[in-house]
Amino acid sequence: MVMPRRSLWSPLAVLVLLGLAALLLSVTLGSAALSLADVWAVARGQGSPLARTLILELRIPRSLSAFAVGGLLAVAGALMQVLLRNPLADPYVLGLSGGASVGALAAMLAGLGGAVITGSAFAGAFLSTLLVFGLAHGTGSWTPSRLLLTGVVVAAGWGAVITLMLAISPAERLPGMLYWLMGDLSYSRSPWPPLTLLLVICLLLMPLGRSLNVMARGPLQAAALGVNVRPLEWTIYLVASVLTATAVTTAGSIGFVGLVVPHMLRLVLGNDQRLILPACALAGGTLLVLADTLARTMIAPEQLPVGVITALLGVPTFLYLLYRSR
């Protein structure tokens, strides 16, 4: 069913407003609370030096990074659920996050940083993609259930490799690696690369919305309607790999965003990918900004890993959604 253009834009406008409200809340809350007047003064180029430092150098970059990471994970999860036609599909379940984590941790263990960690994470995610597709294919064509089971096994294998790497890591590097594995935005640098990638991917995926809608009904129906199925499947998996690798290198391993957000939005908005994909970018970003704000303020001035917050929120939410969708 083709949704009217007004129906497409109305939910997105609501999500944009919610995202802006979450960003404003994250800027004002923290170990040192700021008022809206302080934020407005800094926006006009005024305000105290402390307020300017807190807002411009610490909270805005971190909040924008959280928004970008949440959007990347949610869009990657939505794509994987279209590919496998399974609401339980997720980059973490299918081993993409595990491969990216192994690559990033290997670079950390070698004492490298910066762009090398990003490249290593993408290489790990791409290797995981090749492993899952290659092992699931076997001697015949792969099926969604075979691909999902293969991804679960590969993810378990990456988990074992991560445990081994932690066991042999030097004691001085172990706390940082453990904190990073739980999801941490404290050391996220410039938010612009992940934000730019999120915007570009969403714009590139919009023309594919109709093809993705057909793909969600199955490869046979898609092929019968003229969709070139195999290249589209590889495109979905590669795009999900890039999104996951970027999210992992920015904030570490954060779970449940790519699983819960697309599932929740489909219950509310339907299954039109032209609406779901941009809605996932906005809703996933908003969710992670709120989770990071909660992680910064629960035991301030100490901070919790944001991955702990998403797990605590994601598990009961997903169980409730499964109960409702019975």
Image (spheres, rainbow, N blue to C red):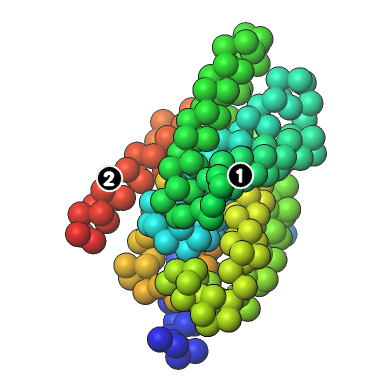
- Three-letter amino acid code of the residue under disc 1: Gly
Q: Please say if the residues under marks 1 and 2 sit with CB atoms less than 8 Å apart.
A: no
Q: Is residue 61 left or right of residue 114?
A: left
Question: What residue sits 63% from the left and 78% below the top?
Answer: 207
Q: Image height check: is 112 above or below 165?
A: below
Q: Image height check: is 107 above or below 173?
A: below
Q: Image height check: is 147 above or below 229?
A: above
Whether residue 267 is visible here, answered yes or no, is yes
Question: What residue sits 52% from the left and 35% below the top?
Answer: 154
CA gap between label 1 and label 2 equals 34 Å
Q: Residues within 10 Å of mark 2 (few under 14, many from 20)?
A: few
Question: What residue sits 52% from the left and 28% below the top?
Answer: 157
Whether residue 62 is visible here, answered yes or no, is no
**In the rendered picture of this protein, how many numbered marks are placed on residues?**
2
Q: Quadrant of residue 249?
A: top right
- Label 2 sits on residue: 316
**Viewer-proximal residue, 17 or 71?**
71
- Residue 156, position as x, y percentages in the image: 48, 30
Disc number placed over residue 93 in the picture, else none: none
Check disc 2 and report its element: helix, strand or loop: helix
Q: Image height check: is 244 above or below 180?
A: below
- Residue 192, position as x, y percentages in the image: 72, 55
- Label 1 sits on residue: 134
